[in-house]
Amino acid sequence: MTQEPSLRDLGIVGDRRTAAVVTRAGSVVWYCPGQFDAPSLLAGLVDPARGGEWRLEGDVTPLRRAYLGDSGVLETHLDTAGGEVTLVDFMPYGPELPRGVCRLVRGTAGATLVLTPAPDYARRPPLLTRDGNAVRVDGNCWLSASHPLHVEGDTVRLSVPPGESGWALLGERPQGTANPEGWLDATLTAWRGVAAETTHSGPYAGAVRDSLRALRLLTFEESGSVISAATTSLPEVIGGTRNYDYRYVWFRDSGMIVRALSRLSPDRKGTLGHGFLDFVCRYASGRDGDQVLPPLATVCGEDAPPVEELPLAGYRGSRPVRIGNAAVSQVQLDVYGNILLASAALYDRAELEEHWPTLEPVAEYLCGHWQDPDNGIWEEEETLPYLSSKVLGAVGLERLADLHPDPATAQRWRSVAGDIRAWVSAHGLTSEGAFAAVAGEEEVDVVAALYPAWGYCAPGAPEMRATLRVLERDHCREGLYWRALREKGTGEGAFLAGTLWVALYWTALDPERARRILETVLGYTNDLGLIAEEADPTSGTPLGNFPQTFVHAALLGVIAELT
Protein backbone atom coordinates (compact mmCIF):
# COMPACT_ATOMS: atom_id res chain seq x y z
CA MET A 1 0.00 0.00 0.00
CA THR A 2 1.52 3.29 -1.08
CA GLN A 3 -0.63 5.54 1.09
CA GLU A 4 -3.58 5.40 3.40
CA PRO A 5 -7.02 5.30 1.75
CA SER A 6 -9.54 8.07 2.18
CA LEU A 7 -11.97 7.44 4.99
CA ARG A 8 -14.70 7.44 2.33
CA ASP A 9 -13.07 4.29 0.91
CA LEU A 10 -13.44 2.30 4.13
CA GLY A 11 -15.96 -0.35 5.06
CA ILE A 12 -16.11 -2.75 7.99
CA VAL A 13 -17.06 -6.36 8.54
CA GLY A 14 -17.45 -7.95 11.95
CA ASP A 15 -18.83 -10.68 14.18
CA ARG A 16 -20.00 -8.50 17.11
CA ARG A 17 -16.75 -9.25 18.93
CA THR A 18 -14.31 -7.41 16.71
CA ALA A 19 -14.15 -5.90 13.23
CA ALA A 20 -11.94 -5.64 10.18
CA VAL A 21 -11.62 -2.52 8.03
CA VAL A 22 -11.71 -3.14 4.28
CA THR A 23 -10.90 -0.58 1.58
CA ARG A 24 -12.79 -0.02 -1.65
CA ALA A 25 -9.86 -1.73 -3.42
CA GLY A 26 -10.36 -4.87 -1.33
CA SER A 27 -7.49 -4.49 1.16
CA VAL A 28 -7.95 -5.35 4.83
CA VAL A 29 -6.02 -2.56 6.55
CA TRP A 30 -7.13 -2.91 10.18
CA TYR A 31 -7.88 -6.03 12.20
CA CYS A 32 -7.65 -6.83 15.91
CA PRO A 33 -8.18 -10.59 16.48
CA GLY A 34 -10.42 -11.59 19.37
CA GLN A 35 -12.02 -8.31 20.37
CA PHE A 36 -12.21 -4.69 19.30
CA ASP A 37 -9.55 -3.34 21.67
CA ALA A 38 -7.07 -6.22 21.33
CA PRO A 39 -3.65 -5.59 19.74
CA SER A 40 -3.87 -5.34 15.98
CA LEU A 41 -2.55 -7.90 13.54
CA LEU A 42 -3.14 -5.58 10.58
CA ALA A 43 -2.65 -1.82 11.02
CA GLY A 44 -1.79 -0.55 7.56
CA LEU A 45 -4.47 2.10 8.02
CA VAL A 46 -2.15 4.02 10.35
CA ASP A 47 1.16 2.93 8.81
CA PRO A 48 1.03 1.73 5.20
CA ALA A 49 4.71 0.82 5.07
CA ARG A 50 4.93 -1.47 8.07
CA GLY A 51 1.49 -1.78 9.70
CA GLY A 52 0.38 -4.88 7.78
CA GLU A 53 -2.47 -5.56 5.34
CA TRP A 54 -4.24 -8.30 3.37
CA ARG A 55 -4.52 -7.17 -0.24
CA LEU A 56 -5.26 -8.27 -3.75
CA GLU A 57 -2.06 -8.37 -5.79
CA GLY A 58 -1.62 -6.24 -8.89
CA ASP A 59 -3.42 -3.23 -10.27
CA VAL A 60 -7.00 -3.09 -9.06
CA THR A 61 -9.82 -0.77 -10.10
CA PRO A 62 -12.83 -0.67 -7.75
CA LEU A 63 -16.13 -1.14 -9.56
CA ARG A 64 -18.87 -1.37 -6.93
CA ARG A 65 -19.52 -2.76 -3.48
CA ALA A 66 -22.42 -3.30 -1.10
CA TYR A 67 -23.44 -5.11 2.05
CA LEU A 68 -25.60 -8.16 1.53
CA GLY A 69 -29.00 -7.25 2.92
CA ASP A 70 -28.90 -6.05 6.53
CA SER A 71 -25.82 -8.14 7.29
CA GLY A 72 -22.22 -7.25 8.02
CA VAL A 73 -21.12 -9.17 4.91
CA LEU A 74 -19.42 -6.98 2.29
CA GLU A 75 -19.29 -7.83 -1.41
CA THR A 76 -16.73 -5.92 -3.51
CA HIS A 77 -16.40 -6.06 -7.31
CA LEU A 78 -12.99 -5.22 -8.74
CA ASP A 79 -11.47 -4.95 -12.18
CA THR A 80 -8.05 -6.58 -12.52
CA ALA A 81 -5.67 -7.30 -15.38
CA GLY A 82 -7.30 -10.70 -15.80
CA GLY A 83 -10.90 -9.50 -15.60
CA GLU A 84 -13.52 -8.90 -12.92
CA VAL A 85 -13.00 -10.37 -9.46
CA THR A 86 -15.57 -10.45 -6.66
CA LEU A 87 -14.49 -10.54 -3.02
CA VAL A 88 -16.99 -11.49 -0.34
CA ASP A 89 -15.57 -10.44 3.02
CA PHE A 90 -17.18 -11.44 6.30
CA MET A 91 -16.49 -12.65 9.80
CA PRO A 92 -18.41 -15.88 10.46
CA TYR A 93 -21.16 -15.07 12.94
CA GLY A 94 -23.35 -17.70 14.53
CA PRO A 95 -23.22 -20.88 16.62
CA GLU A 96 -20.50 -23.43 15.88
CA LEU A 97 -18.83 -21.28 13.23
CA PRO A 98 -15.09 -20.58 13.10
CA ARG A 99 -13.92 -17.15 14.19
CA GLY A 100 -11.84 -14.84 12.09
CA VAL A 101 -11.89 -12.99 8.76
CA CYS A 102 -13.09 -15.02 5.77
CA ARG A 103 -12.52 -13.93 2.16
CA LEU A 104 -14.28 -15.63 -0.75
CA VAL A 105 -12.76 -15.08 -4.21
CA ARG A 106 -15.31 -15.42 -6.99
CA GLY A 107 -15.20 -14.96 -10.75
CA THR A 108 -13.21 -16.48 -13.58
CA ALA A 109 -10.26 -14.08 -13.66
CA GLY A 110 -8.24 -15.67 -10.88
CA ALA A 111 -6.56 -13.61 -8.16
CA THR A 112 -3.72 -13.63 -5.64
CA LEU A 113 -4.31 -12.59 -2.04
CA VAL A 114 -1.22 -11.37 -0.20
CA LEU A 115 -1.18 -11.33 3.61
CA THR A 116 1.51 -9.27 5.35
CA PRO A 117 0.80 -9.54 9.09
CA ALA A 118 2.32 -7.15 11.62
CA PRO A 119 1.50 -8.45 15.14
CA ASP A 120 0.98 -6.31 18.22
CA TYR A 121 0.58 -3.00 16.41
CA ALA A 122 3.66 -3.88 14.28
CA ARG A 123 5.87 -3.96 17.36
CA ARG A 124 7.31 -7.35 16.47
CA PRO A 125 7.87 -9.36 13.28
CA PRO A 126 5.43 -12.13 12.41
CA LEU A 127 6.33 -15.74 13.09
CA LEU A 128 5.03 -17.74 10.13
CA THR A 129 5.15 -21.53 10.41
CA ARG A 130 3.56 -24.39 8.50
CA ASP A 131 0.79 -26.30 10.28
CA GLY A 132 -0.45 -28.95 7.89
CA ASN A 133 -2.17 -27.15 5.01
CA ALA A 134 -2.46 -23.97 7.07
CA VAL A 135 0.07 -21.33 8.08
CA ARG A 136 0.32 -20.36 11.71
CA VAL A 137 0.63 -16.61 12.11
CA ASP A 138 2.35 -15.32 15.24
CA GLY A 139 1.32 -18.28 17.32
CA ASN A 140 -2.37 -17.45 17.83
CA CYS A 141 -3.86 -17.10 14.33
CA TRP A 142 -3.97 -19.48 11.41
CA LEU A 143 -4.43 -18.82 7.72
CA SER A 144 -6.34 -21.65 6.05
CA ALA A 145 -7.26 -21.64 2.38
CA SER A 146 -8.75 -23.47 -0.58
CA HIS A 147 -5.45 -23.55 -2.49
CA PRO A 148 -1.80 -24.01 -1.45
CA LEU A 149 -0.31 -21.22 0.64
CA HIS A 150 3.18 -19.93 -0.09
CA VAL A 151 5.30 -18.32 2.62
CA GLU A 152 7.80 -15.76 1.34
CA GLY A 153 9.64 -14.05 4.18
CA ASP A 154 7.03 -12.12 6.19
CA THR A 155 4.33 -12.66 3.57
CA VAL A 156 1.81 -15.41 2.81
CA ARG A 157 0.41 -15.69 -0.72
CA LEU A 158 -2.72 -17.48 -1.94
CA SER A 159 -3.14 -17.80 -5.71
CA VAL A 160 -6.54 -18.77 -7.09
CA PRO A 161 -6.09 -19.88 -10.75
CA PRO A 162 -8.24 -18.43 -13.55
CA GLY A 163 -11.52 -20.26 -13.90
CA GLU A 164 -11.66 -21.21 -10.23
CA SER A 165 -13.10 -19.77 -7.03
CA GLY A 166 -11.32 -19.85 -3.70
CA TRP A 167 -11.42 -18.85 -0.07
CA ALA A 168 -9.17 -17.99 2.85
CA LEU A 169 -9.82 -17.74 6.58
CA LEU A 170 -7.56 -15.86 8.96
CA GLY A 171 -8.91 -17.47 12.10
CA GLU A 172 -8.38 -18.65 15.64
CA ARG A 173 -7.63 -22.25 14.60
CA PRO A 174 -6.69 -24.11 11.41
CA GLN A 175 -9.51 -25.44 9.23
CA GLY A 176 -9.17 -28.99 8.02
CA THR A 177 -12.62 -29.67 6.65
CA ALA A 178 -14.04 -26.34 5.56
CA ASN A 179 -17.40 -25.18 4.23
CA PRO A 180 -17.02 -21.46 3.58
CA GLU A 181 -20.26 -21.16 1.61
CA GLY A 182 -22.05 -22.80 4.53
CA TRP A 183 -20.38 -20.34 6.90
CA LEU A 184 -21.64 -17.50 4.70
CA ASP A 185 -25.22 -18.82 4.64
CA ALA A 186 -25.25 -19.30 8.42
CA THR A 187 -23.79 -15.83 8.94
CA LEU A 188 -26.44 -14.21 6.74
CA THR A 189 -29.15 -16.08 8.67
CA ALA A 190 -27.76 -14.89 12.01
CA TRP A 191 -27.62 -11.27 10.80
CA ARG A 192 -31.22 -11.45 9.60
CA GLY A 193 -32.25 -12.49 13.09
CA VAL A 194 -30.48 -9.54 14.69
CA ALA A 195 -31.76 -7.07 12.09
CA ALA A 196 -35.38 -8.15 12.60
CA GLU A 197 -35.39 -6.74 16.13
CA THR A 198 -35.16 -3.09 15.05
CA THR A 199 -36.73 -2.04 11.76
CA HIS A 200 -37.85 1.16 10.06
CA SER A 201 -39.82 1.51 6.85
CA GLY A 202 -40.55 5.24 6.81
CA PRO A 203 -38.61 8.15 5.32
CA TYR A 204 -34.82 7.85 5.19
CA ALA A 205 -35.17 4.07 5.43
CA GLY A 206 -31.81 3.53 3.74
CA ALA A 207 -29.98 5.80 6.17
CA VAL A 208 -31.65 4.08 9.13
CA ARG A 209 -30.72 0.68 7.78
CA ASP A 210 -27.09 1.71 7.31
CA SER A 211 -26.83 3.29 10.75
CA LEU A 212 -28.40 0.32 12.48
CA ARG A 213 -25.92 -1.95 10.72
CA ALA A 214 -23.02 0.23 11.89
CA LEU A 215 -24.23 0.13 15.49
CA ARG A 216 -24.73 -3.64 15.37
CA LEU A 217 -21.26 -4.15 13.93
CA LEU A 218 -19.73 -2.09 16.75
CA THR A 219 -21.60 -3.87 19.54
CA PHE A 220 -19.69 -6.36 21.69
CA GLU A 221 -22.45 -8.92 21.91
CA GLU A 222 -21.13 -10.75 24.96
CA SER A 223 -21.53 -7.73 27.24
CA GLY A 224 -24.05 -5.70 25.24
CA SER A 225 -21.64 -2.76 25.14
CA VAL A 226 -21.23 -0.42 22.15
CA ILE A 227 -17.81 0.97 21.33
CA SER A 228 -17.31 4.48 20.04
CA ALA A 229 -15.47 3.51 16.84
CA ALA A 230 -13.64 0.58 15.27
CA THR A 231 -10.32 2.37 14.94
CA THR A 232 -7.66 4.32 16.78
CA SER A 233 -5.73 7.47 15.91
CA LEU A 234 -7.58 8.55 12.78
CA PRO A 235 -7.00 12.29 13.13
CA GLU A 236 -9.45 15.09 13.71
CA VAL A 237 -6.88 17.28 11.91
CA ILE A 238 -4.76 15.76 9.12
CA GLY A 239 -1.14 16.02 10.25
CA GLY A 240 -2.20 17.09 13.75
CA THR A 241 -2.04 15.48 17.18
CA ARG A 242 -5.74 15.09 18.02
CA ASN A 243 -5.57 11.34 17.42
CA TYR A 244 -7.31 9.14 19.98
CA ASP A 245 -8.23 5.52 20.62
CA TYR A 246 -12.01 5.14 20.43
CA ARG A 247 -12.28 1.35 20.72
CA TYR A 248 -13.84 1.62 24.16
CA VAL A 249 -17.29 2.02 25.67
CA TRP A 250 -18.21 5.56 26.77
CA PHE A 251 -21.11 5.40 29.23
CA ARG A 252 -22.40 8.77 28.05
CA ASP A 253 -22.33 7.71 24.40
CA SER A 254 -23.96 4.37 25.17
CA GLY A 255 -26.78 6.09 27.02
CA MET A 256 -27.43 8.36 24.07
CA ILE A 257 -27.25 5.44 21.64
CA VAL A 258 -29.78 3.26 23.42
CA ARG A 259 -32.15 6.21 23.92
CA ALA A 260 -32.04 6.90 20.19
CA LEU A 261 -32.66 3.25 19.39
CA SER A 262 -35.56 3.05 21.81
CA ARG A 263 -37.49 5.46 19.57
CA LEU A 264 -37.23 3.07 16.62
CA SER A 265 -37.71 -0.31 18.26
CA PRO A 266 -41.12 -1.89 18.96
CA ASP A 267 -39.42 -3.33 22.03
CA ARG A 268 -38.15 -0.07 23.49
CA LYS A 269 -34.85 -1.65 24.47
CA GLY A 270 -34.03 -4.13 21.69
CA THR A 271 -30.78 -6.07 21.58
CA LEU A 272 -28.63 -2.96 21.54
CA GLY A 273 -30.39 -1.48 24.57
CA HIS A 274 -31.33 -4.37 26.82
CA GLY A 275 -27.82 -4.85 28.19
CA PHE A 276 -26.98 -1.19 28.83
CA LEU A 277 -27.87 -1.08 32.51
CA ASP A 278 -26.48 -4.56 33.16
CA PHE A 279 -23.16 -3.46 31.69
CA VAL A 280 -23.09 -0.27 33.77
CA CYS A 281 -23.97 -2.17 36.94
CA ARG A 282 -21.33 -4.83 36.37
CA TYR A 283 -18.71 -2.15 35.85
CA ALA A 284 -19.77 -0.03 38.82
CA SER A 285 -20.20 -2.89 41.28
CA GLY A 286 -17.63 -2.91 44.03
CA ARG A 287 -16.98 0.84 43.87
CA ASP A 288 -17.97 2.76 46.96
CA GLY A 289 -20.39 5.64 46.73
CA ASP A 290 -17.68 8.30 46.75
CA GLN A 291 -15.43 6.67 44.16
CA VAL A 292 -15.30 8.43 40.81
CA LEU A 293 -16.86 6.42 37.98
CA PRO A 294 -14.55 6.63 34.94
CA PRO A 295 -16.27 7.80 31.77
CA LEU A 296 -15.23 4.78 29.72
CA ALA A 297 -14.45 1.08 30.01
CA THR A 298 -13.27 -1.81 27.89
CA VAL A 299 -15.81 -3.98 26.10
CA CYS A 300 -15.45 -6.52 28.92
CA GLY A 301 -16.31 -3.95 31.58
CA GLU A 302 -12.81 -3.30 32.89
CA ASP A 303 -10.91 -0.05 33.34
CA ALA A 304 -9.52 1.16 30.03
CA PRO A 305 -5.72 1.17 29.87
CA PRO A 306 -3.70 4.38 30.10
CA VAL A 307 -2.34 5.98 26.95
CA GLU A 308 0.61 4.46 25.15
CA GLU A 309 2.14 5.95 22.01
CA LEU A 310 3.18 3.61 19.21
CA PRO A 311 6.16 4.06 16.85
CA LEU A 312 3.92 4.10 13.77
CA ALA A 313 3.86 6.68 10.99
CA GLY A 314 0.25 7.72 11.60
CA TYR A 315 -2.61 8.21 9.16
CA ARG A 316 -1.24 10.60 6.54
CA GLY A 317 1.55 11.57 8.93
CA SER A 318 -0.76 12.35 11.85
CA ARG A 319 1.12 11.45 15.01
CA PRO A 320 1.19 10.22 17.66
CA VAL A 321 -0.62 6.93 17.16
CA ARG A 322 -2.19 6.12 20.52
CA ILE A 323 -3.68 3.10 22.24
CA GLY A 324 -5.49 3.45 25.54
CA ASN A 325 -7.29 6.64 26.49
CA ALA A 326 -6.36 9.36 28.97
CA ALA A 327 -10.02 10.14 29.66
CA VAL A 328 -10.14 7.10 31.94
CA SER A 329 -8.59 9.24 34.68
CA GLN A 330 -10.94 12.20 34.20
CA VAL A 331 -14.04 13.24 36.12
CA GLN A 332 -16.97 13.77 33.74
CA LEU A 333 -20.07 14.48 35.78
CA ASP A 334 -22.31 14.33 32.70
CA VAL A 335 -21.66 10.57 32.67
CA TYR A 336 -23.58 10.21 35.93
CA GLY A 337 -26.55 12.19 34.68
CA ASN A 338 -26.60 10.26 31.42
CA ILE A 339 -26.63 6.91 33.19
CA LEU A 340 -29.63 8.02 35.27
CA LEU A 341 -31.44 9.54 32.31
CA ALA A 342 -30.93 6.48 30.10
CA SER A 343 -31.99 4.11 32.86
CA ALA A 344 -35.21 6.05 33.45
CA ALA A 345 -35.95 6.16 29.72
CA LEU A 346 -35.35 2.46 29.10
CA TYR A 347 -36.65 0.67 32.19
CA ASP A 348 -39.77 0.72 34.32
CA ARG A 349 -39.97 0.62 38.10
CA ALA A 350 -40.05 -3.19 38.32
CA GLU A 351 -37.09 -3.63 35.97
CA LEU A 352 -35.02 -1.14 37.98
CA GLU A 353 -35.60 -2.92 41.28
CA GLU A 354 -32.52 -5.15 41.11
CA HIS A 355 -30.35 -2.24 39.92
CA TRP A 356 -30.98 0.24 42.74
CA PRO A 357 -27.81 -0.86 44.61
CA THR A 358 -25.83 0.55 41.68
CA LEU A 359 -28.03 3.44 40.59
CA GLU A 360 -28.50 4.93 44.06
CA PRO A 361 -24.74 5.49 44.57
CA VAL A 362 -24.60 7.13 41.13
CA ALA A 363 -27.41 9.48 42.10
CA GLU A 364 -25.93 10.13 45.54
CA TYR A 365 -22.55 10.94 44.02
CA LEU A 366 -24.26 13.56 41.86
CA CYS A 367 -26.07 14.96 44.87
CA GLY A 368 -22.80 15.41 46.72
CA HIS A 369 -20.59 16.54 43.83
CA TRP A 370 -22.68 18.39 41.26
CA GLN A 371 -21.02 21.68 42.22
CA ASP A 372 -17.54 20.28 41.53
CA PRO A 373 -15.66 21.29 38.39
CA ASP A 374 -15.10 18.48 35.92
CA ASN A 375 -13.53 17.78 32.52
CA GLY A 376 -16.80 18.10 30.64
CA ILE A 377 -18.30 16.30 27.69
CA TRP A 378 -15.34 17.12 25.42
CA GLU A 379 -12.80 15.74 27.90
CA GLU A 380 -10.94 19.00 28.26
CA GLU A 381 -7.72 19.02 30.26
CA GLU A 382 -8.91 21.97 32.39
CA THR A 383 -11.53 21.20 35.04
CA LEU A 384 -14.25 23.86 35.04
CA PRO A 385 -18.00 24.22 35.75
CA TYR A 386 -19.16 22.90 32.36
CA LEU A 387 -22.85 23.62 32.09
CA SER A 388 -23.87 20.44 30.25
CA SER A 389 -22.66 18.41 33.24
CA LYS A 390 -24.96 20.37 35.56
CA VAL A 391 -27.93 20.16 33.20
CA LEU A 392 -27.60 16.40 32.77
CA GLY A 393 -27.27 15.99 36.53
CA ALA A 394 -30.55 17.82 37.09
CA VAL A 395 -32.59 15.92 34.52
CA GLY A 396 -31.04 12.58 35.46
CA LEU A 397 -32.00 13.03 39.11
CA GLU A 398 -35.49 14.22 38.22
CA ARG A 399 -36.25 11.33 35.85
CA LEU A 400 -34.94 8.63 38.14
CA ALA A 401 -36.70 10.14 41.16
CA ASP A 402 -39.99 9.46 39.36
CA LEU A 403 -39.20 5.73 39.53
CA HIS A 404 -37.66 5.43 42.98
CA PRO A 405 -39.81 3.40 45.43
CA ASP A 406 -38.93 5.55 48.46
CA PRO A 407 -40.79 8.90 48.43
CA ALA A 408 -38.30 10.55 50.79
CA THR A 409 -35.30 9.65 48.62
CA ALA A 410 -37.15 10.72 45.49
CA GLN A 411 -38.03 14.07 47.03
CA ARG A 412 -34.44 14.66 48.13
CA TRP A 413 -33.18 14.01 44.61
CA ARG A 414 -35.76 16.39 43.18
CA SER A 415 -34.66 19.01 45.71
CA VAL A 416 -31.03 18.70 44.58
CA ALA A 417 -32.17 18.94 40.96
CA GLY A 418 -33.98 22.13 41.87
CA ASP A 419 -30.79 23.52 43.41
CA ILE A 420 -28.93 22.73 40.18
CA ARG A 421 -31.57 24.48 38.11
CA ALA A 422 -31.39 27.57 40.32
CA TRP A 423 -27.58 27.59 40.01
CA VAL A 424 -27.78 27.32 36.20
CA SER A 425 -30.24 30.22 36.07
CA ALA A 426 -27.95 32.35 38.25
CA HIS A 427 -24.56 31.44 36.74
CA GLY A 428 -25.07 29.62 33.46
CA LEU A 429 -26.29 32.28 31.03
CA THR A 430 -24.22 34.55 28.82
CA SER A 431 -24.77 38.30 28.49
CA GLU A 432 -26.97 37.48 25.47
CA GLY A 433 -29.16 35.16 27.55
CA ALA A 434 -27.82 31.95 25.97
CA PHE A 435 -26.68 28.85 27.81
CA ALA A 436 -22.94 29.18 28.35
CA ALA A 437 -20.53 26.33 27.68
CA VAL A 438 -18.83 27.15 31.00
CA ALA A 439 -20.58 29.02 33.80
CA GLY A 440 -19.42 32.63 33.94
CA GLU A 441 -18.10 32.70 30.36
CA GLU A 442 -19.51 33.89 27.03
CA GLU A 443 -18.76 30.90 24.79
CA VAL A 444 -21.72 28.73 23.70
CA ASP A 445 -21.38 25.05 22.79
CA VAL A 446 -23.41 22.88 20.43
CA VAL A 447 -24.22 20.34 23.15
CA ALA A 448 -26.79 22.85 24.47
CA ALA A 449 -28.97 21.98 21.47
CA LEU A 450 -29.76 18.74 23.36
CA TYR A 451 -31.18 20.39 26.45
CA PRO A 452 -34.81 20.20 25.24
CA ALA A 453 -34.35 16.56 24.17
CA TRP A 454 -33.08 15.78 27.66
CA GLY A 455 -36.16 17.45 29.11
CA TYR A 456 -34.38 20.36 30.74
CA CYS A 457 -36.41 23.07 29.01
CA ALA A 458 -38.79 23.66 26.13
CA PRO A 459 -37.37 24.18 22.62
CA GLY A 460 -39.00 27.61 22.50
CA ALA A 461 -37.59 28.79 25.84
CA PRO A 462 -35.89 32.21 25.57
CA GLU A 463 -32.56 30.71 26.63
CA MET A 464 -32.75 28.14 23.84
CA ARG A 465 -33.70 30.72 21.24
CA ALA A 466 -30.71 32.82 22.29
CA THR A 467 -28.44 29.76 22.28
CA LEU A 468 -29.41 28.82 18.72
CA ARG A 469 -28.86 32.39 17.53
CA VAL A 470 -25.30 32.31 18.87
CA LEU A 471 -24.62 28.87 17.45
CA GLU A 472 -25.80 30.00 14.01
CA ARG A 473 -23.65 33.11 14.19
CA ASP A 474 -20.44 31.76 15.72
CA HIS A 475 -20.30 28.01 15.16
CA CYS A 476 -22.01 27.27 11.86
CA ARG A 477 -20.58 27.14 8.36
CA GLU A 478 -22.04 25.58 5.22
CA GLY A 479 -24.79 23.94 7.22
CA LEU A 480 -22.46 22.24 9.71
CA TYR A 481 -21.64 23.06 13.34
CA TRP A 482 -18.45 23.12 15.38
CA ARG A 483 -17.76 22.40 19.03
CA ALA A 484 -16.52 25.10 21.40
CA LEU A 485 -13.22 23.48 22.37
CA ARG A 486 -11.02 25.38 24.79
CA GLU A 487 -7.95 24.41 22.80
CA LYS A 488 -8.22 27.13 20.19
CA GLY A 489 -6.87 26.91 16.68
CA THR A 490 -6.99 23.13 16.44
CA GLY A 491 -8.36 23.23 12.90
CA GLU A 492 -10.70 20.35 13.62
CA GLY A 493 -13.56 19.70 11.26
CA ALA A 494 -17.25 20.22 11.78
CA PHE A 495 -18.69 17.97 14.49
CA LEU A 496 -21.29 15.81 12.78
CA ALA A 497 -23.05 14.52 15.90
CA GLY A 498 -23.42 18.09 17.13
CA THR A 499 -24.80 19.15 13.76
CA LEU A 500 -27.43 16.43 14.11
CA TRP A 501 -28.23 17.64 17.64
CA VAL A 502 -29.11 21.00 16.13
CA ALA A 503 -31.32 19.19 13.63
CA LEU A 504 -32.97 17.36 16.54
CA TYR A 505 -33.69 20.70 18.18
CA TRP A 506 -35.42 21.98 15.05
CA THR A 507 -37.63 18.89 14.68
CA ALA A 508 -39.94 20.42 17.27
CA LEU A 509 -40.06 23.95 15.83
CA ASP A 510 -39.21 23.78 12.14
CA PRO A 511 -39.15 20.22 10.73
CA GLU A 512 -38.20 21.40 7.25
CA ARG A 513 -35.12 23.09 8.64
CA ALA A 514 -34.27 19.91 10.52
CA ARG A 515 -34.52 17.93 7.26
CA ARG A 516 -32.12 20.30 5.51
CA ILE A 517 -29.53 19.86 8.25
CA LEU A 518 -30.02 16.09 8.26
CA GLU A 519 -29.55 15.90 4.50
CA THR A 520 -26.40 18.02 4.74
CA VAL A 521 -24.92 15.44 7.12
CA LEU A 522 -26.07 12.56 4.93
CA GLY A 523 -23.94 14.10 2.18
CA TYR A 524 -20.87 13.12 4.24
CA THR A 525 -21.72 9.41 4.42
CA ASN A 526 -19.78 7.08 2.15
CA ASP A 527 -21.30 4.65 -0.35
CA LEU A 528 -21.92 2.15 2.47
CA GLY A 529 -23.74 4.70 4.62
CA LEU A 530 -20.90 4.96 7.16
CA ILE A 531 -20.07 8.26 8.85
CA ALA A 532 -16.91 9.58 10.47
CA GLU A 533 -16.75 11.75 13.57
CA GLU A 534 -16.11 15.02 11.73
CA ALA A 535 -15.92 16.52 8.25
CA ASP A 536 -14.14 19.34 6.44
CA PRO A 537 -16.86 21.12 4.44
CA THR A 538 -14.30 22.84 2.20
CA SER A 539 -12.76 19.64 0.86
CA GLY A 540 -15.57 17.22 1.73
CA THR A 541 -13.04 15.10 3.61
CA PRO A 542 -14.28 12.93 6.51
CA LEU A 543 -12.14 13.23 9.64
CA GLY A 544 -11.66 11.36 12.91
CA ASN A 545 -12.30 7.78 13.89
CA PHE A 546 -14.52 5.71 11.66
CA PRO A 547 -17.32 4.81 11.72
CA GLN A 548 -18.48 6.74 14.77
CA THR A 549 -21.42 5.30 16.68
CA PHE A 550 -22.16 8.64 18.35
CA VAL A 551 -22.95 10.15 14.94
CA HIS A 552 -25.02 7.20 13.75
CA ALA A 553 -27.09 7.31 16.94
CA ALA A 554 -27.67 11.05 16.55
CA LEU A 555 -28.82 10.48 12.98
CA LEU A 556 -31.31 7.84 14.12
CA GLY A 557 -32.63 10.18 16.80
CA VAL A 558 -33.36 12.92 14.26
CA ILE A 559 -35.07 10.57 11.82
CA ALA A 560 -37.20 9.07 14.59
CA GLU A 561 -38.50 12.53 15.48
CA LEU A 562 -39.20 13.41 11.84
CA THR A 563 -41.33 10.32 11.20
Image (tube, rainbow, N blue to C red):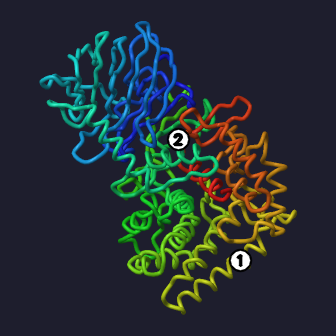
Query: Which residue ends up furthest to the left in the rendered image?
Result: 132
Picture quadrant where residue 371 is located? bottom right
In front of the other: label 1 or label 2?
Answer: 2
Estimate how packed mark 1 is, as few (under 14), some (14 to 19) or many (20 or more) residues with alpha carbons within 10 Å: some
Residue at the image point whose x is 56% and y is 82% from the top: 401
Mark sitting on residue 268: none
Query: Does residue 178 appear left or right of residue 185 in this picture?
Result: left
Relative to 25, residue 510 above or below: below
Q: Quadrant of the C terminus?
A: bottom right
Q: Is residue 331 visible?
A: no
Q: Which mark is residue 547?
A: 2
Label 1 sits on a secondary structure element that is helix
Find the distance from the CA under tag 1 to the CA under tag 2.
Answer: 36 Å
- The residue tagged 1 is 421
Q: Is residue 368 visible?
A: yes
Above/below status of 28 relative to 247: above
| Residue ID at (32%, 43%) | 93
Which image quarter: residue 118? Answer: top left
